[in-house]
Image: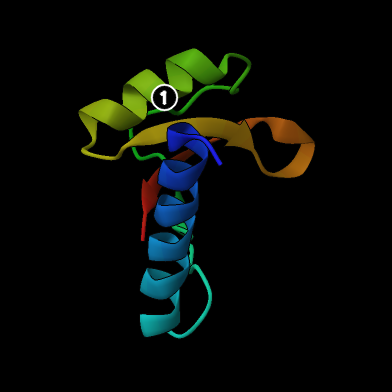
Amino acid sequence: MGRLSVKVLVVVLLLLAATEEQGGSVQVALARVCTRPSHKFHWACLDTNKCASACLTEGYTGGKCGGRRGRRCFCTWHC
């Protein structure tokens, strides 16, 4: 085996040993996204970018058009 193969083998073994200490699997954290109707966006939501801008002024992390027929602006944040 060449030097590169030995180094790769050592790294793989170290990664396997590290995941065994953590329960044997790699865990991925998924963030939930919560929504709430905007208090400042009162007209028909036709542009998601305008909705998101209004939600940013309300302290949320973003916004999108949704609801029935996609006409309301809903602010989003990670919850």
Q: Residue at 53% across / 75% down in the picture? A: 25
| Kind of element beneath mark 1 | helix
Quarter of the image for residue 23 reads bottom left
The amino acid marked with disc number 1 is: Ala
* Residue 64 percent across, percent down from the top left: 54, 31
* Relative to 10, 45 lies left or right: right
Q: Residue at 48% across / 56% down in the picture? A: 12
Seen in the picture, residue 39 relative to 49 is either above or below; the reply is: below
Seen in the picture, residue 28 relative to 25 is either above or below; the reply is: above
Seen in the picture, residue 38 relative to 14 is either above or below; the reply is: above
Q: Nearer the viewer, residue 45 or 14?
A: 14
* Residue 60 percent across, percent down from the top left: 29, 40
Q: Residue at 60% across / 22% down in the picture? A: 44
Q: Residue at 45% across / 14% down in the picture? A: 50
> Badge 1: few (under 14), some or many (20 or more) residues near its Cα, within 10 Å?
many
Q: Nearer the viewer, residue 65 or 31?
A: 31
* Residue 29 percent across, percent down from the top left: 44, 63
Quarter of the image for residue 31 reads bottom left
| Residue linked to disc 1 | 52
Image quarter in which the C terminus is found: bottom left
Q: Nearer the viewer, residue 75 or 7?
A: 7
